[in-house]
Structures are given as C-alpha cells and as structure tokens.
Amino acid sequence: MILVTGANGQLGQCFRQLADQNPNVYFYFAGSSELDISNKRMVRKFFDQHPVSWCINCAAYTAVDQAQKEPAVARKINISGVKNLAEACSPQGIPLIHFSTDYVYHTKQNTPFKEDDPVSPKGIYARTKRSGERAALLANPNTMVIRTSWVYSEFAHNFVKTMLRLGRERSNLNVVYDQIGTPTYAPDLAAAVLDIIRKAETEAVPPYLLAGIWHYSNEGVTSWYDFAKAIFEIKNIPCAVQPIESKAYPTPAMRPHFSLMDKSKIRTAFGLQIPHWRESLLRCLEKLD
Ligand SMILES: NC(=O)c1ccc[n+]([C@@H]2O[C@H](COP(=O)([O-])OP(=O)(O)OC[C@H]3O[C@@H](n4cnc5c(N)ncnc54)[C@H](OP(=O)(O)O)[C@@H]3O)[C@@H](O)[C@H]2O)c1
C-alpha cells in the first residue's frame, strides 16, 4: 500500500486524483486528523497497523510568512514530524518520498542548481525544510527528497488561482519580476512520483538507489511577473501587469531571487518526460474552466 500523508493538501489532492485514474494501485490517504505526523505515537501505531510499502509525505507546514511568527509549530511539523515518519519507515526498509523546496537555494549562484550545490536557507520555513531533509535522510536511508518549486494546481490556494481571482477583480496588478524560477504543476509532480514507484518496482530498483536529493519542477524558466502575464494572456483577462522589484513588495520571509533547478538527474535516472511550464499551465487553466 502507498501511504499518502497530508492527503488533503494541494499535492495530496493531486495524488487522490491520480489514484482515481489508477484504480489498480493501492493508495491509502491519511489527512492530518487521522495521521498527525508530529505525533510520534500516532505515527508508530499507524505503521504497526497498516501494511505500508511506500510512504509519500505531502504533510508540511507551508505558510512561509506565518512561519516567522510561529517557528516552533513549523519545526514540529517540518522537522520532528518528518523524522517521525522516517523512523517509522526505517526498520521495515520502507522507502519514504518527501518533498522539499527551492527556497533552500538562497545563495548568489546564478546558474541552475544541482542537487549537491551548497544551500543557504533563509527564514524559518526554508530552514525547517532543510533540517527536515536532513532528519529524514539520517533516520531512513531509503529516503528520496524531491526539491520542488512554485507549486500550483486546481486544488487549494496557489499563485495561479490567486492571479485568476485578482485579475478579474482589478484592472492593474504589480507582480515581482526579479525572482526567477520554474513553476511546478502539482499533478505532473504526482504523476512523476507514481512513475518512479512503478519503475522501481517493475525494474526491481533497490530502494537505496532512490535515496538522496532530487529536483523536480516543470521545464523552462520564468519570473512571477511573466507567469502572471501568461495566465492573463491565456485566459484573455484584460488586467495590466506591472513588473516590480521584490523590495517594493516586502514579505516577512525573504524569497530567493534565483532558484532555477537542474533536473537532469531525475530525468535521466527515471526516463521522465517533463512538460514545459507553459504546456502544464494550459492544462491547469483548462481544468479550472
Ligand atoms: N506550494 C508550494 O509552492 C511548494 C513549493 C516548494 C515545495 N513545496 C513542498 O511541497 C509539499 C506539498 O505542499 P502543498 O502545496 O501540497 O502544501 P499544502 O497544500 O499546504 O498541504 C500541506 C498539508 O499538510 C497537512 N499537515 C500540516 N500539518 C500536519 C501534520 N502535523 N500532520 C499531518 N498533516 C499535516 C495540512 O493539513 P491541515 O490543513 O489539516 O493542517 C495540509 O493538508 C510540502 O512539503 C511543501 O513544503 C511546496
């Protein structure tokens, strides 16, 4: 059984959708009330009572700015919670697939990041995510950490849905143009993960070969400004977008200016066909119709 934790969040809901499309795969979806990952006893009990063969952790504290005000809560979920899962997986050799963020790359580098490039997370969210990666890799050698970026979908709150709402309410919008990265359509990420699990099982890939850090986002590169422009162009929304610098839009937690990730490792290892961000945006906007 493939356990999906944090199953009611954005990525969790994409796995639910994937499960509907793949009725032959045995998924088990656990939301935070059924399985609170920060509750060690609850996690242990769950693993004792269920035949988990893969664990996909979609549970996380993701309120990037709010985290500055409640670091203890962010740590409890993003570090201790992840460690609890990894410790529950480890004795049975269960592979843990865990998600992290491009925000760990808050350095001056301006070429696409490789998985072993130095990291320098700034702010509570980014630091707790980095510590969570470490805790998971340490507690369970069969941990696959997938760093992803700018995640959106037809589910939950995200940039695309916010832009659609604001674009229809306003005639003008300021959007930052000095943060460069790549959007990730969450259903593409979920499908890639299922692909990896299938390949690992059919080709009998030993779990330790999955271990370590990996990157996944869509292909291509953009800024939040260009991303907003693309959304409005595709949807014919007559909202003018002005490019502004990040310093004109201060937030409690700083975001990296450049977080482009090199995906050649995951692409090559699993033969993934990763769609360009604009193709995936089109698919998402069609679904949102
Ligand atoms: N969204 C992005 O742009 C982005 C970018 C890079 C990386 N990521 C990473 O991608 C992953 C998925 O993100 P997402 O966008 O799907 O986040 P999300 O929509 O905020 O979902 C997170 C889920 O985690 C659950 N959760 C929180 N605390 C929990 C706990 N103690 N036990 C169990 N579940 C708990 C939440 O449930 P409740 O609502 O019930 O609390 C929520 O359903 C995260 O690891 C995130 O850090 C996201």
Image (cartoon, helix red, strand yellow):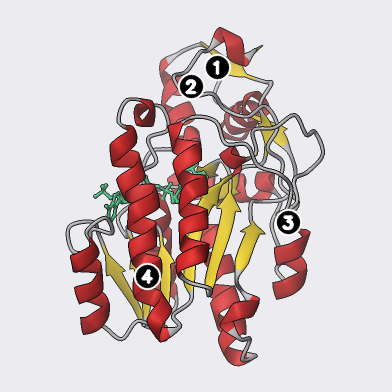
Lateral position of residue 38 relative to residue 105, left or right = left
Q: Which mark is residue 263?
A: 3
- Give the camera-side residue of 88 and 14: 88
Are circles 3 and 4 on residues that touch, CB within 8 Å?
Answer: no
First in residue order: circle 3 vs circle 4: 4
Are circles 1 and 2 on residues that touch, CB within 8 Å?
Answer: yes
* Residue 269 pos. (x, y %): 73, 73
Q: Which mark is residue 167?
A: 2
Q: CA distance from mark 3 to mark 1?
A: 33 Å
Dot 4 corresponds to which residue?
87
Q: Is residue 241 visible?
A: no
Where disc 4 sits, the SS reads helix
Q: Is mark 1 within 8 Å of ligand 1?
A: no
| Kind of residue at badge 2 | Gly
Which mark is in front, 3 or 2? 3
First in residue order: circle 3 vs circle 2: 2
First in residue order: circle 3 vs circle 1: 1
Residue, x 74% and y 48% (percent of image)?
117
Where disc 2 sits, the SS reads helix
* Residue 80 pos. (x, y %): 34, 54
| Kind of residue at badge 1 | Cys
